[in-house]
Image (spheres, helix red, strand yellow):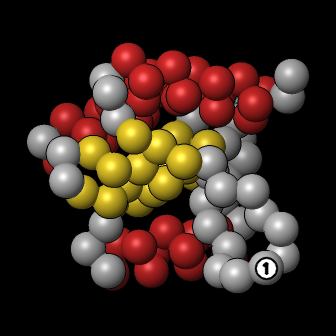
Amino acid sequence: MTPEGKVKEEIKRGLAERGIWYFMPVQTGYGKRSVDFICCWDGGFVAIEAKAGKNKPSAYQRGILNEIEEAGGRAIVAYSWRDVADELEQYG
């Protein structure tokens, strides 16, 4: 499993443990592109882009995250479940 795959697995476990609904869209080239996780938490829209090591979101991914925030959603770049949990605590 890739380092980013390990981060995604950790995030999936954390989301499931907290009862947060999530979807991981498969990028097929059709429709609007997205980030790694689309979630519904406490009535709100949360998007998560998982990264590992020193990797950063691409300009395109950053643009998607910015669009989500501008629309009133929450956008998180996560290197671990702790990053997601910390952000959710800030919003909660």
Residue at image point 68% right, 74% down: 33
Q: Which residue is at the front of the view, 39 or 89?
A: 39
Residue 9 appears anywhere in the view? yes
Describe residue 84's horizontal placement relative to residue 29 as left or right.
left
Residue 24 coordinates in the image, percent (x, y): 62, 48
Describe residue 48's horizontal placement relative to residue 85 as left or right.
right
Q: Is residue 30 above or below residue 38?
A: below
Q: Which residue is at the front of the view, 31 or 86?
A: 31
Residue at image point 38% right, 17% down: 17
Looking at the rendering, in which quadrant would you find the N terminus?
Answer: top right
Question: Mark 1 highlights which residue?
Answer: 30
Residue 31 coordinates in the image, percent (x, y): 70, 82
Q: Is residue 7 above or below residue 64?
A: above
Looking at the rendering, in which quadrant would you find the C terminus?
Answer: top left
Residue 82 coordinates in the image, percent (x, y): 41, 25
Residue at image point 84% right, 76% down: 29
Quadrant hosting residue 61: bottom right
- Which amino acid, by three-letter code, is at mark 1? Tyr
Q: Which residue is at the front of the view, 35 or 78?
A: 35
- Say few, some or many: other residues with alpha carbon within 10 Å of mark 1 (under 14 / 14 to 19 / 20 or more): few
Count of numbered labels shown in the rendering: 1
Describe residue 71's horizontal placement relative to residue 76 as left or right.
left
Residue 64 coordinates in the image, percent (x, y): 55, 74
Residue 77 appears anywhere in the view? no
Describe residue 50's horizontal placement relative to residue 38 as left or right.
right
Q: Is residue 32 above or below residue 28?
A: below
Residue at image point 72% right, 47% down: 55
Mark 1 element type: loop
